[in-house]
Amino acid sequence: MSSHNASDEYGAESGIPTFKVIVIGDVSVGKTSIISRFCDGEFKESYPSSLGVDFKMKEMKVSNQSAIKLQVWDFAADIHNRFANVAKHSYSEAHAIIIVFDITNKESFQDLETHWLGELQQQTLRENHFKILVGNKSDLVDKRVVTNAQSLASKYGCEYMETSAKKGDNIDQLFQTVGRNIFEAYQRGGFKEELWTEDKEKKKKCSLQ
């Protein structure tokens, strides 16, 4: 890949600001399904478990019709054990974090506080980052076992939304909420000096000196 293409992939050439979103949560809660539904408009009944980290890009319009690009990273459930340094750097660079659980799986909800939300509190995060807790599989109404997620979201300073990647319910709304909050922080100057690509270029320069 040429340097021109590489820079354009991250928005430096196009002039469209690019922001990094990471999606975390237990295995089989629907992280990959949510990302695929948003980025590709498709849903499969099963996906192979993520082996580490993967990402997809999607350009979108935010509330004032400005264009932004989201680079949405899909984290394997055991990312912290197998790729601790990758996870640490990804958290520090993230403009938004989506924490997913399955409303039909009580363990995936319990793991939020014992693992995922607790993990976030141990990380160095951007000052103006946005967090949202997502209860996926809302289409499985008769199998619901989690009803108190809103209070947990409030406790950890997250917004809360329920989605169905299978039916597509609230998927666009989820990423509109994420994109709008990121862009508003960007407009206020929160990210102007630390756009993800510029950040990486600064780190490269520092490491070469």
Image (cartoon, helix red, strand yellow):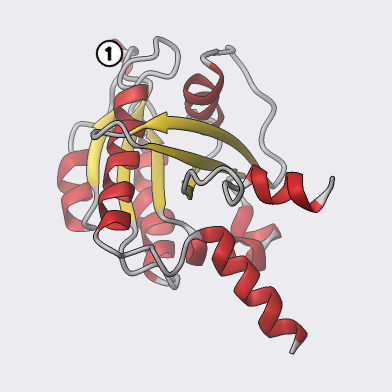
- The residue that label 1 is drawn on is 141
Residue shown at 68% from the left, 51% from the top? 7
**Callout 1: few (<14), some (14-19), or many (20+) C-alpha neighbours within 10 Å?**
few
Residue 6 in view in this figure: yes
Q: Residue 124 at x, y = what percent?
A: 44, 73
Residue at 29% x, 26% y: name it.
173
Q: Of helix, strand and loop, which one carries label 1?
A: helix
Q: Position of residue 4 (x, y in %)?
A: 75, 49
Considering depth in this image, is 33 or 37 the residue closer to the camera? 37
- Return the x and y of residue 12 as percentages of the image width and height: 59, 52
The quarter holding residue 167 reads top left
- On screen, residue 73 versus residue 111, left or right, reads right
**Quadrant of the drawing holding the C terminus:** bottom right
Vertical arrangement, residue 41 with respect to residue 2, above or below:
above
In the displayed structure image, the side of residue 177 where residue 151 appears, left or right: left
Total marks shown come to 1
Taking 201 as reference, is 146 left or right?
A: left
User: Looking at the image, is 44 positioned above or below residue 199?
Assistant: above
Asked if residue 111 shows in the view, the reply is no
Between 8 and 179, the residue placed more toward the observer is 8
In the displayed structure, 166 sits above or below 119; it is above
Q: Position of residue 171 (x, y in %)?
A: 37, 23
The N terminus sits in image quarter:
top right
At label 1, the amino acid type is: Val
Observer-nearest of 140 and 197: 197
